[in-house]
Each structure stands twice: as structure tokens, then as C-alpha cells.
Image (cartoon, rainbow, N blue to C red):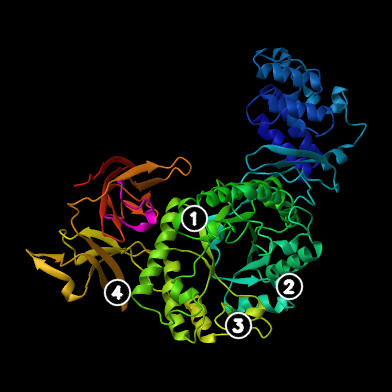
Amino acid sequence: MKRLSVLVLTLTMYLGLFNSNAIEAISNDIIASSADILFGDVGGDGLINSLDAAQVLKHDVCLITLGAVGLAAADVNGDGGADNLDAAMILKYDAKIIENFPVNNKAPSEDTSEYGSEEDSGTEDSCSEESDPEDSEARHTITFLDYDGRVLKEAVISKGEEVVPPPEPAREGYIFIGWDKDFSNAVSDLQLRALYEKIETAKEWLSNIVFGINYFNGINENNDNDAYFRWIVEQGFNAVEIGCRFPHLVNSIHGDLNLEYVEKLKTIIDYAYKYDLYVILSLYDGYDYMWTSLNYDNQDSIIEMVNTSYKKLVESLNAYDDKLAISFCSEPRDYTDNLIDEEACNVLNAINREFVDMVRATGGNNLYRKLVITTGWSRCSGIAAENFRMVDDEYTFVRIHLYEPGDFANSKTEEPVFNEIQHQLELVEAFNNIKRNFIDKGIPVYIGEFGCRPKNNDEERVKWAKCYLSLANCYNIKCFIWDTENKGSGIENSFAISNKERLEWLNPVFMNYILDMFKNNTFIDYYDTYNYTVSINDPIELEKNVTNIRTNQTEIISVNCDDDKLILLNGNYYAKESGEIIFNYNINNHNYYYIVNVIDNYEKIDFELEFRREATTNYYQLWITTAGFSKSRLDYDWISTNEDVIKVSKYSTITIVGDGKSSVIAKEKSTGAIGVVDFVVENNEIVDIFVHTVS
């Protein structure tokens, strides 16, 4: 009853609801029942602890003004005031040093009416000389809390006084976006909590991209960048790779920036931002100075470049927000032979790590900047992919280039016709390589360059685009189509797709078909039917389950092949002879294909293989050990009998795919000689190996 009465008194005094006689009556009732006060509980929460002591100390130094209830509860020593002595006793009580307060031991007849009126008690508030009651009521506390309730700052202000917030707080993986309340015109105590927005991971960032285009060497061209970026957005693109040669941006490879070119670059980025495009800055060699030549002799120079000129460029771009991603280099290789080997891969892995560490150390927006690294030659398979090591950074992703099938898409003079069977099989295998080498390992990846050279064959290029982009859509791989600089638009069979001066497509049939695929979602689905190997004595199933790669839904299909390839024996179909058999099936009027590689029984073993784990790469490989046979692994065809368990590259590198049994067969190309090793895989580890000996 005591606390409720005081609350009513306080409210009525504040609101002016009752006259002075009514207020005096209520006040007398409060004074009469003062024995009900829970001394020490200044906060009124039913507890007595250090928080109450803190309130008393704030009152004592005039940071806050306690009301009637708070003053009554604060005077635990019964001297008629609320000061540091009372706070000390409350702390002793909280620490269980004392069990009672002096005021609890006062006789009931002793007067406690001082809490109703300071004038009656003869004790003045120590703050009364500095501020009158009206001023005290105008003072209030603004408390800034972090997301977890931690106090960042507490400010006591007077009416009309401006509140200065604390420095922007930091939270790992998040960006501070403000406070949950407006405190500009606070008129009472106010508690604010920091608001954060989770920073997107590399995978999440990539998921925002619909379709991208390359804008290469714009800093050296007199294009209307504003008009160009507006145009590509109207065409349906929401991302752009701004490509330039790194030596243009620096005065020397280990020196200062070329500020004129850097400002040109920033202007281009600003126009892309104006139209809300996601931007990836992609840097290339100058071809006159091969700064990324991947060999041990050049490694120290590359690392020095990363921490000097490249660092200065990254620092100059720090102000850009999360829509800008920065790549390290494109298509790096060892320029002494223009190839990728294990040495080149080792150097690239080291400088990729150096690049990411350097950018993170510059802080600011670069702490969570999306970064792009790549493989040797930006390839998705072979030794470049097998020896690639992803950095441990959830804001970094991988860029690859894929101009496949090579004879149709990349060659200027070769095949102008898209072969529905062979070329589709090559594209299926290429995207399966991306899945196996990146997606299955949890590595975010995108295709930074792709395209198809024109050979007066737009209708054939449309067939290619349908297959290529549908496979990318199934695996949710984002693609950036390559477009050359302006001078390329006048070169026959170049990858140029636009005229940037007239803002038009060079081959509108081809480009409009591609853009329509994205606008109207006219992609086709693909299924997980991959090439595999069987023995000639193994039956071949003509009815099987296939899984939609995009939806993960399963369907039962019937497959077909040429009639002369199979023979029916005892209710099962077998291959008549060894070799490749192409099977096909149809879903929704689209033909799909896969290859079954039929091998002879390997009852006769011609040479033996040795299974090794390479110390430098930690990869499993097979080596030919029998005298009289070539030791070059490229002289053999390498075949896995169960690619759901083990994949084997043309270099004999073993990749574990899943649990089960599989054999790896090496077949010498020139003689047909055979070597075989059997594997058993459990929990993605090889647990048993059997090497077939020469028979």
C-alpha cells in the first residue's frame, strides 16, 4: 500500500489532478505507513544490490534526482539524507557484510517524515543550491546499450541539451546502422540499443547477382559511362566486372599509384553505383610486364607488390560499400612456359593468402570487403583446380573462366555447328568439374568470363547458350559474359558483343535470346546422369532413377542407345563389345545424353601401379613402376569404374567422391596395356588398396 500510495502521489503531483488539500492527505497517509518501505531498494525492483548503490551515488553528485520513494529507500542509515554513506551500506549489505541497515533498528515512534518534506526534516538536498526542483525534473538520463545490453555510454542532460552518442560500436560480422530510437529531442529518461545489419558472406553476396557483363579497359576509352551503365541495366544486367590492366594504375609495380588513372577508375565505379549495380574490379596483366608470373623466382616480387602498390589501390577504394568486390588477378600462370604446374599452384596459393590478409589489415570497409581469388589460368579442372587451396575467409570467393566447348566457343576457325550430343556432353562434364572441385567443397564460385565467338552462326550459338546457361542455372553459378574493349567490335570472330558508342548489340539475335532466358526464366533443367565405366561382363540398366540438379526431385526414366550396341541375355542387357556407348533419354521434349565406357575384363595385367601420397600437395596419385613402360602418366588413359566413389584425372590424381568400391584402370594409349588398382572408401577415406600384379 505504501509504494502504491507514493506512486499515486507522484503522478498526481506531476499531472496536477488534485488540489493541495488532497495531496496533503495522501502524503500524511504515506508518512504514517513509512514502516512498509524496503530500505535499500532504490530502484523499486524488490532487490537490494549494487545497482541501488549506484543510483544513490548518482543522486549524491547531482547526476540524477531521486523521487520521494527513492529518497525514502535510499536513507538506510536514517540520517534524513541520501549520500555516499548510504551507498556504502547498501554495498556492504549486497556483499553480506551486514544483515540489516541502521534505519531498520529505529523505534517505530521515531519520526521518518523527512521523506515527505525536506522542509519538515530540516535537511536540504545537497543539489538544491545548484538547481531548483523544476530544473531537477528537467534532467534525464540517456543510456546507450550495445546489442547484448552492455552499457556503451550514459549521459545525464538538461532540457534542450544535445546528446552526443558514443563512437560507433563494432560487432564482428555485422555493420552498425544506428540506434533503435530517436534521441534528438529527449524529454525523459531514454534507453537506446545499437542496431546492426549482418554482413553478407561471399556466397550470399553472389546470390544477389542475376546476370553480369564485363566492361574491360573503359579507363582508356572515351565512352559515355553514364549512358552505358543505364543501358545495360535496362537490358537486364544487375552486375558488372570492371576490368583494367593493373600496370595502368601504378607508376611502378612496387611504387605509387597513377592517381590520374585511379580517379578514372573511381569515376567508372561511381557510375556503376549510380545504377545500383554490383561491381567486381578485375585486374589483368599488362602483357609487357608479367607481374603475376607464377614461379618461385618471382614469388617474393609478387608478395612485395601485394603489400605496396596493390595495398595502396585497395586503401584508395576503402570508402566504397559492400557492393564493390575486388579481385586479385585474372588467368595467372607461369609466363616462362605459359603453363600451370605444381610450382605455379603453390606460388598462387601463397599469394592468394597474402592478398586476403593484406586487404583485411587495412580495416574499415575492407575488413569485410568481398574479395575474389582464382586458380591457375582461372581453370575449373586439371592440375590448376586439383592443387588450388581456398583461403579461410567467408567473404572471399573464386573466379573461373569457362569457354567451352573449346572447338565451338573459343576457336575462331573450328566447328561452327553446335553438336547436340558431343558438345552437350562436354558442357555437362565441365559443369560437373565445377561442382566437384568447388561447390561440393563449400567454395563459393562464379564464372567471371564466358562467351562464344561468332562465325555467322547465331542460331547455333543460341543452342549453345541454351545448354550452357541452363547448366549454370541448375548449379546456381552466376555468370559474367565477356565483352571486349571497343576496338574488338571491328575484329572478325572476336568476343565483342556490343558497340559501346551506339549502345547496341553486334549480334542481336544471340544476345536477345540470352537476355530473354533471364527475363522470362526459360532455362531447362538438367539431371545427374554422368558418364561411368562398366566391365563387359556387367549388365547395363535401361531404366533408372535420375535426380533434377536444381530441384533435387527424382524421376524414373527409360534410356536408349543404338540397337547394335547391346545384347539381351537372361533378361539383362550387356554390351556387345568394349568401347563407348552413348545413351539418351527425353524429359519435357529435351534430349539428354551420357556415356557408358565398356572395358574388357582385366584378367591379364600388363604392368603394375604404385599408389603414392604426394608430400608437397597431399594428393593421392598413381605411378607406373614396371620396367619397359612409359613413366609419363599422360601416355595413359585413366579410368574409374565407379565415379560416385573415385574420380581420376589425366595426371592420375585420385579424388574421393563418396563411400564404396572402385577400381582405377590405366590403359597405355599406344599399346592398350592394362594396370589396375582396387580401392575401398569409407567415411571419405581410403581404407583398403589392392594392386593387381602382372599376370
Q: Which residues are magenta?
A: 626-642
Q: Is residue 27 above or below residue 283?
A: above
Asked if labels 3 and 1 touch by Cβ distance under 8 angstroms, the answer is no
Image coords of residue 97 (percent x, y): 67, 12
The secondary structure type at the circle numbered 2 is: helix
Q: Which residue is mark 4?
A: 587
- 73 or 33, nearer to the observer: 73
The secondary structure type at the circle numbered 4 is: strand
The quadrant in which residue 78 appears is: top right
Residue in the picture at 40% in, 79% down:
418
> Could you tell which of marks 3 and 4 lies nearer the N-terminus?
3
For label 1, the crowd category at 10 Å Cα-Cα, with few meaning under 14, some 14 to 19 and many 20 or more, is many
Tell me which amino acid carries mark 2: Asn
The number of callouts visible is 4
Q: Which residue is mark 3?
A: 491
* Residue at the outermost front position: 628
> Could you tell which of marks 1 and 3 lies nearer the N-terminus?
1
Q: Which residue is mark 2?
A: 220
CA gap between label 2 and label 1 equals 32 Å
Which mark lies nearer to you, 2 or 4? 2
Q: Which residue is mark 1?
A: 384
> Could you tell which of marks 2 and 3 lies nearer the N-terminus?
2
Tell me which amino acid carries mark 4: Ile
Label number found at residue 203: none
